[in-house]
Image (cartoon, rainbow, N blue to C red):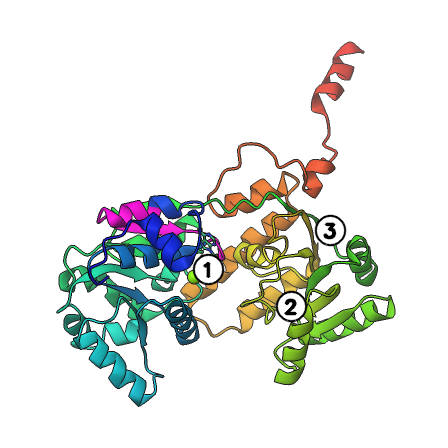
Amino acid sequence: ASGIDETPDAVLKRVFGFDSFRGQQEDVISAVMAGEDVLVIMPTGGGKSLCYQVPALCRHGMGIVISPLIALMDDQVAALRQLGVNAAALHSELPPDRLDQTRADLREGRIDLLYISPERLVSPGTARWLARNPVSVLAIDEAHCVSAWGHEFRPEYRALADLPSVFPGVPRIALTATADSRTQDDILLALGMPEAKRLTSSFHRPNLFLAALPKGSETKQVQDALTPHREDAAIVYCGSRNRTERMAKSLRERGFNALPYHAGLSSQEKHATLMRFRSGEPMVIVATVAFGMGIDRPDVRCVVHLDMPASPEAYYQQIGRAGRDGEPADTLLLYGGEDMARARHWLEQSTAPDTEKRVTQARLESMIALTETVECRTQALLACFGEALSAPCGHCDNCRNPAQTFDGTEAAQKVLST
Ligand code: ADP
Ligand code: MG
């Protein structure tokens, strides 16, 4: 940033008002401060932004943040400006007067943190123009977008491998919540930073109790799962809009304060439901995946999946909306043959490129394996992200009710003793 010589701790307190770093933040920030390239893998909500915002404000020069989503960029810039940080965005949807202002600020070196879309940064001349002033750090947010393995591949991200030729010696920090190790390798390869330090935060959420059941009488199963949570907030995820409407109705008939939420509702309806959810009243939201982004009610005590999610990542993200306050929360995944049939149908109908279909297929297979496991479910979920939990969690369905396995020793002893 512009000349301040503060420590990361001081910036954390003065600018952001927080007392201490969380998880891997401190290690990441020290590495970036020392000029190293790093790959940060941290779950959503883990606090990735501070990992680049703090070094950008402590190091000399302007921090550049490459981000694929304009709405997210604008949100972050607005939040930073509220904190008194000179932040700005450069993307295709900027009003002309704003663009002129940002250009002028950049020319005068008045910006400390610049958010930019990848297509903008790689457009001819832009990077060189930005490189005329000192740059403190290059952050590549949502770095899985560079990987063809990822589900959100962005071809413009590929060009980011050339950044060191324009910004020599500037540390790069790539960040993502997508954790499988194949994607990680691919990200580093594609960004041309195979030697980067990898810093992975644990994905373990010890307060989430995982369970899965084959689908039976669904309404009864959902009702049983929700009954201990009548005074709480809960979310029931469904695979289709129709199912959200029907399940919400069934639950209302059974005395639950249940409302549907999906992309087909009017914006007034969605807004009204969100406001009630945020107000803290006990309620059940019966939703499609449209209910997600920006939902941060901390006291959700139960998440039920009426249909199997398409990948362990989607599953992790959705159950992760429970227990944000750190208190125990229950999750239940219902699964059945039609889930697999639906997925297979999608794969057959899809016009997606073969590589993408293979990835989708592989993710689905991992999800099925996770659903059907008889081992500790928490360990199995973390294993999907390359994380080893040293002992069974002790509180998932499989830990509480170990599968009855055929005891070969006893049978053999019987045979031998007769
Ligand atoms: P991510 O990008 O990993 O999903 P964010 O960077 O958006 O996560 O951070 C999630 C939330 O956590 C934000 O509200 C942020 O202010 C908060 N947060 C991050 N780091 C800390 C910290 N060290 N202390 C307190 N709150 C933090
Ligand atoms: Mg983020």
Q: Are marks 2 and 1 in contact (CB under 8 Å)?
A: no
Residue 216 is left or right of residue 366, and the answer is right
| Numbered disc 3: secondary structure | strand
Q: Earlier in the sequence, mark 2 or mark 1?
A: 2
Q: Disc 3 marks which residue?
A: 213
Query: Which residues make up the magenta segment?
Result: 28-46
- Viewer-proximal residue among 133 and 191: 133
Percent across and percent down for residue 358 are: 46, 60
Which comes sooner in the sequence, label 2 or label 3?
Answer: 3
Q: Residue at x 61, y 52 (%)?
A: 325
Which of these two is toward me, 280 or 129?
A: 280
Rendering quadrant holding ligand 2: bottom left
Q: In the displayed orientation, state which residue is furthest to the front.
A: 14
Amino acid found under the numbered disc labelled 2: Arg
The kind of secondary structure element at disc 1 is: helix
Q: Which residue is mark 2?
A: 278
Residue type pointed to by label 3: Leu
Does 83 appear in magenta?
no
Question: Residue at the bottom extreme?
Answer: 96
Secondary structure under tag 2 reads helix
Q: CA distance from mark 2 to mark 3?
A: 30 Å
**Residue 146: percent from the left, percent from the top?**
34, 63
Residue placed under numbered mark 1 in the picture: 359
Question: Of the residues tagged 2 and 1, which is closer to the observer?
Answer: 2
Q: Quadrant of the N terminus?
A: bottom left
Task: Point out the frontmost of discs 2 and 3.
Answer: 2
